[in-house]
Amino acid sequence: MAIAIVMGLAAVVVAGVLQGLFAVPMKYAPRWNYEHIWLTYSLVGMVVLPWILTTVTVPHLAEVYSLTPALVLVRIAGFGLCWGIGSALAGLGMNLLGIGLGMAIILGLSASVGSLIPLLILTPQQLHTPQGHTYLAGTVIMLVGIALCARAGMLRDAARKRGESVPGRSFVAGFIVCCLSGLFSSSLNFSYAFGGEAVDRARALGASHLWSTGVVTALAVSGGFIANLAYCGYLLRKNHTLGKFSGDGAGTGWLCGALMGFLWFGGQSLYAVGITRMGELGVVIGWPLLMGMIIVTSNAAGILTGEWNDVSSATRRFLAFGMLIILAALGVLAMAQRAA
């Protein structure tokens, strides 16, 4: 039992590292625009890999979907589409704010809203219980952490505008985009919250507890792919850049985009394995551990790739305190989940 828990913890830690690093390859495809690498990542991570894994691990997959009410499937895909809008905005936000800061804001809002909204919709009476109060407290703490990170970003943006050698980027625009991304990204949780009947069908037809949620994941993230395809397609047409998919540097671009897809979906899959091996502990500590590792890893990657070069110690303190408070808020939300 102890070995299983340790292996589960290790899997969740690695999952967080993979997802924290998934956007880094964007920095190494200089000949491609955002729309090229993000569309490639979306195709690999949201369509190819999820359906391969689900087809292999869930028996009688077509029958599972045929026996699930159409309204349930529409909800899964619809919430996935909303999540996809958040995903497309995430790429833009991280491009404007940097990987570390953008990821912290997006994940912070997504975690808070993703925990609170299902409570309000499915069991609103729980809002006036200790569990509901804990969710609200975690959300408030999260907003404080995000505000501190935002202050760090504003100070960094001001420093960039003063420096001649560093091109300034609009912090306000990036912050708004990341906030919208966080709100939309929480929709993936709703796909799982309202897709339980599809999971039950899969288990009834022989799917294991570990992989049965794949019937929701594959359909939801495919819905998300539609949103990313639409936006990237719009940019390709607007910028007349479709030819870059086969032009100079295309090989590097395809490789980096595919790597992003493998890192992101690999993290998703390892997380499922990890929390299953941990048993009851998986629900309590698996999720905040994943979020924490993503935030820590993405910020470490951001620092190592120069996102916070030439900033003052005060700016770094705002960032550090903001990250610590976000991690604390994740712990509070995990306590609320445990009470559930």
Image (tube, grey):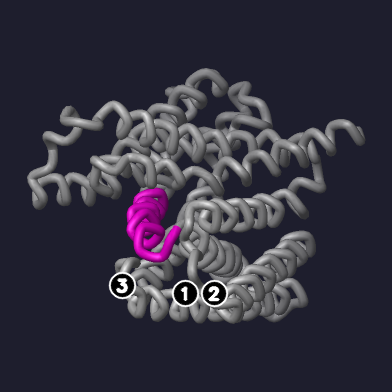
The C terminus - image quarter: bottom right
The answer to whether residue 99 is visible is: yes
Determine whether, in the image, residue 98 is placed left or right of residue 291.
left
Figure check: 214 above or below 143: above
Of residues 186 and 204, the one nearer the viewer is 186
Of residues 245 and 53, the one nearer the viewer is 245
Question: Quadrant location of residue 331?
Answer: bottom right
Mark 2, Cα crowd under 10 Å, few <14 / some 14-19 / many 20+, is: many
Distance (Cα) linking label 1 and label 3: 18 Å
Mark number displayed over residue 164: 3
Q: Which segment is the magenta one?
A: 79-98
Distance (Cα) linking label 2 and label 3: 24 Å
Q: Which kind of residue does numbered mark 2 sit on? A: Cys
Figure check: 330 above or below 206: below
Q: Which kind of residue does numbered mark 3 sit on? A: Glu
Name the residue at 41% across, 54% down.
Answer: 83
Name which of mark 2 and mark 3 comes first in the sequence. Answer: 2
SS at circle 1: helix
Question: Quadrant location of residue 300?
Answer: bottom right
Disc 1 versus disc 3: nearer the observer: 3
